Image: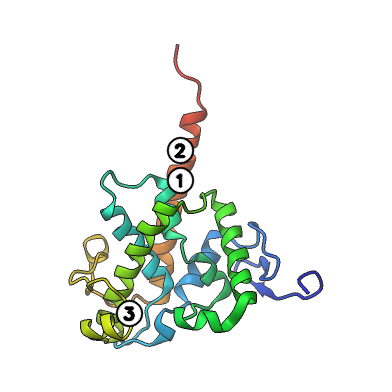
Amino acid sequence: MIGTTRAWVRMPSGRRLDLLNPTPFDWDDADLALGLARTYRWGGHSIWPLPLSVAQHSITVMLLRRASASTGLDPRSELRELLHDAEEGLLGFDCISVLKPFLGEGFRSLSARLEEAVFRRYAVPQWSADDKKAHKRADRIAAASEAVHVVGWTPDEVRKTLKIPFKPLADDPLTPRYGGTAWEPWPPQLAAQRFLAELERLTAQMDKNAVYTASPTSA
């Protein structure tokens, strides 16, 4: 079916992505940032005027993961955190986790192919078991905090109903970096700009490190 069925998406840049056969060259950085900024978590539900974008969530997880690392994160690992939900921006859909099993193997395979294309484009490695465990902790802490401060669940409901075993944060990790009102979802254009800035910062650091590593040592 994959060889004959097409699922084309035209990006704002004019590039075209076949969701069933993605390649790392089918979008540019701004396409990804805007797609993530227009893709919403929690089914788009929010107690704020706007829903929470996957772009904003991704930056939150990156900052939480950085803060939890005793020696900090190298740019490649930090970039992997930023891109951990990148396939959702290409797909334009953040499926609520409990529904994913009902969508079946086809959806899982589609998401995996998109993630692989993203990781290849940005030259980030697949997760090790330890890295995945640390990432999942940061991701779940972010989810618990969003559930309370963005969606309106109580901490008790987060633990008992949503089955998230981590305590919601009181302080928004984003406000020291960006200011603004704690836990308020950003408008899509602002979320896209901030995600793109983080993406460009990290890819530039990786390029700089690659040039430095490749340079001959001085005599």
> Residue 188: image x %, image y %?
42, 75
Q: Which residue is mark 1?
A: 204
N-terminal of the pair, mark 3 or mark 2, is: 3
Kindly tell me whether residue 87 is visible in this rendering: yes
Q: Is residue 114 above or below residue 46?
A: above
Q: How is the image coloured?
A: rainbow
Residue 152: quarter of image: bottom left
Q: Are marks 3 and 2 in contact (CB under 8 Å)?
A: no
Q: Residue at x 40, y 56 (%)?
A: 198
Q: Which residue is mark 2?
A: 208
Query: What amino acid type should be assigned to the residue bearing mark 3?
Result: Lys
Q: Residue at x 42, y 49 (%)?
A: 77
Q: Which residue is mark 3?
A: 163
Dot 2 alpha-carbon crowd within 10 angstroms: few under 14, some 14 to 19, many 20 or more: few
Q: Is residue 212 above or below residue 35?
A: above
Instruction: Quote the CA–CA distance across marks 3 and 2.
Output: 42 Å
Q: Are marks 3 and 1 in contact (CB under 8 Å)?
A: no
Residue 44: quarter of image: bottom left
Could you tell me which quadrant the N terminus lies in? bottom right
* Front position in the image: 32 or 105: 105
For residue 79, side relative to residue 93 (left or right): left
Q: For mark 3, give the secondary structure.
A: loop
Query: What amino acid type should be assigned to the residue bearing mark 1?
Result: Ala
Q: Residue at x 50, y 21 (%)?
A: 216
Instruction: Quote the CA–CA distance across marks 3 and 1.
Output: 39 Å
Q: Are marks 1 and 2 in contact (CB under 8 Å)?
A: yes
Residue 184: quarter of image: bottom left
> Residue 199: image x %, image y %?
45, 56
Q: Which mark is residue 17?
A: none
